[in-house]
Amino acid sequence: MRIAEIVTAIFLGILSIYLMWKSGEPPSWNPDVPRFANIGFIEGEGPGSGFWPFWLSAIMLLTCIWTAVNWYRRLTPASQSSGQFLDGYGKRMMLVVGGALFGFLALIHFVGFYGAIPVFMIYYMRYLGSHGWLLTLTVSASLTVICFFFFDIAMRIVLPKGYLEPLFIPLYEMFL
Amino acid sequence: MDVLIALWQGILIALEPINLGLAVIGVVVGLFVGAMPGLGSVNGVAILLPFTFVIQSFTGGATSPMIFLASIYYGAMYGGAISSITLGIPGASTAVATTFDGRPLALAGRAHVALVVAALASFAGATVSNLLFTGFAPLLADVALSFGNPEIFALMLLAFATFVGLGGDDIPKTLFSICFGLVMATVGFDIISGEPRLVFFDITGFTHGIRFLVLAIGVYGIGEMMWTINTSRTGTNMSKVEVTFANVFDAIKQFKQAWRGTAIGSALGFFVGILPAAGATPGSLMAYGISKMTSRRSAEFGKGALDGVAAPEAANNSASTGAMLPMMTLGIPGSPTTAVLLAGMVIWGLQPGPLLFTDQPEFVWPLIGSFYISNFVAVTVNLLFIPVFLWMLRMPFTILAPLIFVLSLVGTYAAYMDMFDVWLMVFFGVGAFLLRILDYPLAPAVLAIVLGPIAEPKLRQSLLLSDGDFSIFFTRPIAGPITVIAILLILLPLFKLIRDKLRKTA
C-alpha cells in the first residue's frame, strides 16, 4: 500500500504537469500566439481560456507534493500500511471483472450490444457466479430481449449491432 | 398563503396518474437500491438518469422525470435500513448508524420492530423536512435573486470549502479530487473565447467535453460495483423476520418509545443536510450521537435501543430533503445525489437557481408536492412489502453485479449515442476504484464536474467586471462574508493542527 501511495502521487503529479502544459496551448488557427499566453489576464477580455484549468492543475500538482510529504512523514493510513494495494483476490477480481468489462466493450464493436450482452452475462453468471445453465440462459436472454424492445423498438434509440446488423432487419420489419 | 395554494396545486399535479405511477416505481426501485449493500441513492439515480430521457419523451416536460428520480432518492433512504437490520450490513453509508441498534434488535428476534420503527421514523423525518423545505425554499430563492456573479462564485467556493474543512477526508486528496473534477469540466471548447481546450491527443471525442454522466456512472456504477466485489468477500447471514399483521401492529405501538430519537433526527437532519459536503451520512451519525448523549437510557444504546434506530433513520430522510434546498434555490448541490439531480435538470433544459421559483413554478411546485406524495408512498410500500424486499435481498451479487454493469454501459450509450463516452466511462470507473483504495474521495470530483461549467464563467465575468482585481470577492456585502467563511473553512484543518500541537507541547 505504501509503495502504491507514492507511485500514485507521482503519477498524478505528472498528470497535473501535463494538464498545465496542455492548458497553455495556443489555438491551432493562431500559432503565433506563444504557449501560456492564455493563462493570465488579457486586457479587455478578462482571464484567458487557459486561466482556470492551468491554475487548477497547478493546485493539483501542489496537492500531489503535499501527499508525497505526508507519505514521507507517514502521516496517512495508506503511507503507514504494510498491507498490499491489491491482494490476490483483488488482483484476480481486477483481471476477471475489469478484463471482462473491457472485453465486453471490445466485443460491442464486432457483435454489437445484443451480441455482447449475453456473452458477458453468461461469462459472469456461469463462470464467475457458478449459476446453473437454466438460470444463466434465462437471465441473459431476457435482458437482451428487454433491452432490444426497450431501446430499439420503444425508444428508437438504435444500439450498435456490429456484424449482426443483418439479423435485425426482419425484426425491424416486424415491429417498426 | 400563496405558498400553500402553489403547494396544493403541485400536490394535485404530483397525484396525476402518470406522476403517481412514476413515484411508486421510483420508490420501489429506490427501496431496492437502498437495501442492496453496495448501492445507494446516488448509484440508483446516476445509473437510471439516462432512462429518464424516455420518460421525458413521453411526458414532454421535466417534472415527471424529476419526480421519478426524487422518488428513487426517497425510497433509497428508507431502503438502507432493511439490510442494516436484517444483514448487519448498511445498504448505504447513510444507514451505517442504523446498524448500531438495528442489528442487535434483529439478533434478539425483534427485527420486525426495528424495521417498522425505521420506516415510521423515516416518514416522520421526511415529513418534518418537507414542511421546513416548503417554508424556507421560497424565502431563500427570493434572497438569492439579488445574487450577481461574484456572489454565486463565492457560494461555489463555499461548497468546495466545506468538503475541505468538514469532509473529514485526507485534505490534499480532497483538494486534488475537487480540482480534477473542475479541470475535467473544462475539456472541450471554452464557451467565452471559443478556443478548444484540453483536447487530449486530438481525439475528437474530447471536443464535446467530458459529460457529467460519464464520470458519475463510471464512479457510482462501475467503480462502486468493483469496490463492493473487492470488499464484500464473505457470505452474509440474514436474520429471520416474521412479518404478520399482528407483528406490525405491535411494532407500531412500540414506536412511541422512539419519539425522542425521531424528533432529534428530524430537526437535526434537515439543517445538516443543507450544508454541502455534510448530507445524510453525517446527519444520521450526529443524530445518533446526540440522541445517545441526551438520553436517560444511554446505556441501552448499541444493545437494541429503539431511539438508536429512529434517530439516524429520521435524520437521513430529513437530510435528503434538506440537501435539495441549496440545489433548487441556489443551484448548488449539497450531496453527490443532488449533484446528479442538478445535472439532470440542466440536461432537461432547466436552470437550477433562484429564478427556477419565478420562471418555472409549474416545475417546482409539483416536484415539492411529489416529495410529500413519495414520502407517503415510501412508508406504505415499505411496510406492506417488507417480505418482498427481504426476498430480493437474497439475490446473489453474481447476478446483480453484471446487471448493473450492463445497465451502466447501455445507459451511457443511450444518453449520448457515442461509444467513446462508454469507453471513457469504464476507464473512469476502474480509475475510481483504484483511487478509492488509496482513500481519494470521489464525491468532490463528481460535484466539481457539475459545478465547474457554472463556476468558471462566474469567476471570469467577475474578474472582467473588476478588471482582474480579486478584491471584488471580499468587498461586496454578500460575497465578502461568504468568501471569508469559505477561506476560514479551507484553513480549518490548519487551525486544528496548530491547536493539537499546542496541546501536545502544553
Image (cartoon, coloured by chain):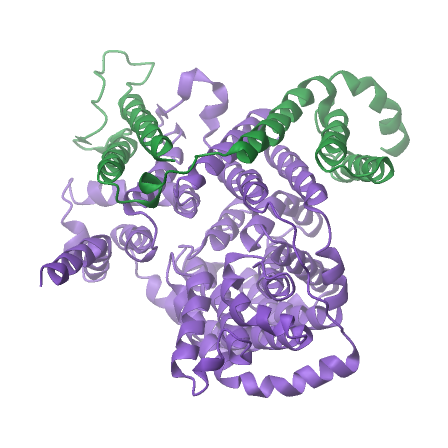
- For residue A76, say whether it is visible: yes
Q: Give the green chain's letter.
A: A
Left or right? Give the position of B416 relative to B277. Answer: right
Among the 4 quarters of the image, the one containing residue B144: bottom left
Q: Position of residue B381 (x, y in %)?
A: 71, 68
Work out which quarter of the rendered image holds the C terminus of chain B and state it: bottom left
Left or right? Give the position of A127 relative to B495. Answer: right
The residue at the point 73 percent across, 31 percent down is A127
Q: In the figure, B7 relative to B393: above or below?
A: below
* Residue furthest top in the image: A31
Q: Position of residue B409 (x, y in %)?
A: 63, 34
The residue at the point 41 percent across, 20 percent down is B200
The residue at the point 76 percent across, 62 percent down is B388
Among the 4 quarters of the image, the one containing residue A48: top left
- For residue B457, say whether it is visible: no
* Residue furthest front in the image: A82
> Between A17 and A39, which is closer to the camera in this rendering?
A17
The residue at the point 46 percent across, 25 percent down is B206
> Between B217 and B403, which is closer to the camera in this rendering?
B403
Q: Position of residue B114 (x, y in %)?
A: 62, 74
> Total marks drawn?
0
Q: In the figure, B356 relative to A104: above or below?
A: below
Q: Position of residue B433 (x, y in %)?
A: 49, 37
> Between B478 and B182, which is closer to the camera in this rendering?
B182
In this structure image, what is the colour of chain B?
purple
Left or right? Give the position of B183 relative to A156. Answer: left
